[in-house]
Amino acid sequence: MATVIRVPVLADNYVWLFAFAEGRCAAIDPAVADPVLEAAAAAQLAITHILNTHWHPDHVGGNMGLKAATGCTIIGPAREAAKIPGIDRTVDHGDTVTLGAHEGHVLFVGAHTAGHIAFHFPTANALFCGDTLFAMGCGRLFEGTADDMFRALAQLKALPAETRVYCAHEYTLSNARFAVTVEPDNAALQARFAAVQAARARDEPTVPFTLADELATNPFVRARDAAELAERRRAKDVF
């Protein structure tokens, strides 16, 4: 059974250590190197791989430091390969990444950035989605369109509801504050908002979460079409 370790870095980023075999792990979207190396050492894990979901500096900034320290293999999106420091292997939709006994499926979810990908590991019940899906939110449309995001979220919605989602930021409280303005009569959303407020008041993380949570409470996942998603994204951008 795989273990996933949360490494908080910068202001609100999460780097994930996916311990896929005894003593070995992959670092997901390492913004910086040193805290990730320290966390791996504390867990007695060797970093053998990096998985990058997209090119933004707060997701790849630690690539070269980790590679210098560990000799790890860097795997990232083919459509953004020129922007991924140290990349060794490019992948795109339908490709697989094998880590120990776990086979990860690559999903193209371009919207936040044009070449964004996600990694789904069914046997670990884990989705590493970068900045595509957040708890009660979705990524800003820096390089893609609302249609792109609607298609991306549709792919993620089709995964098993019990899938645990490991996104790259602690944005949950601000997302929840917006979400309740969109669906004020959603009882599940109101309950989750209260739980998130309490957790953050205790300085507790709110990630990972399940796809089931998002199906019940995320206004972007619940958007009926791309036009509705676009309207909600515009409103969130100025909220």
Image (cartoon, grey):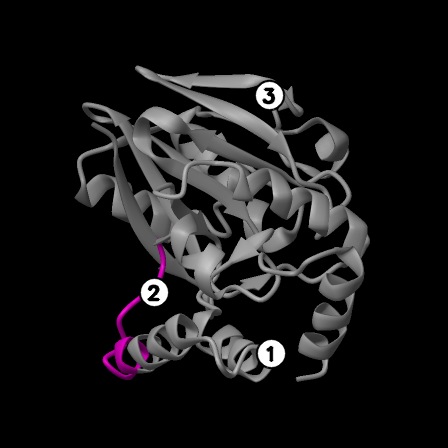
Q: Quadrant of residue 43?
A: top left
User: Identity of the amino acid at label 1?
Assistant: Val
Q: Indicate the secondary structure of the residue bearing disc 2.
A: loop
The residue singled out by tag 2 in the image is: 206
- Asked if the magenta segment contains residue 172, the reply would be no
Q: Indicate the secondary structure of the residue bearing disc 3.
A: loop
- Relative to residue 34, is residue 150 drawn left or right? right
The residue singled out by tag 3 in the image is: 88
Quarter of the image where the N terminus is located: top left
Answer whether labels 1 and 2 touch (C-beta < 8 Å).
no
Q: Residue at x 62, y 27 (%)?
A: 87
- Asked if the magenta segment contains residue 204, the reply would be yes
Could you tell me residue 176's position as x and y percent? 48, 76
First of labels 1, 2 by sequence position? 1
Magenta part mainly helix, strand or loop? loop
The residue singled out by tag 1 in the image is: 182
Q: Which mark identifies residue 212? A: none
Name the one closer to the observer, 131 or 48. 131
Above or below 76: residue 214: below
Above or below 161: residue 227: below
The magenta-colored residue range is 198-208
Task: Tell me if residue 86 can be seen.
Answer: no
CA separation in Å, label 1 and label 2: 21 Å
Q: Residue at x 56, y 49 (%)?
A: 59
User: Identity of the amino acid at label 3?
Assistant: Asp
CA separation in Å, label 3 and label 2: 32 Å
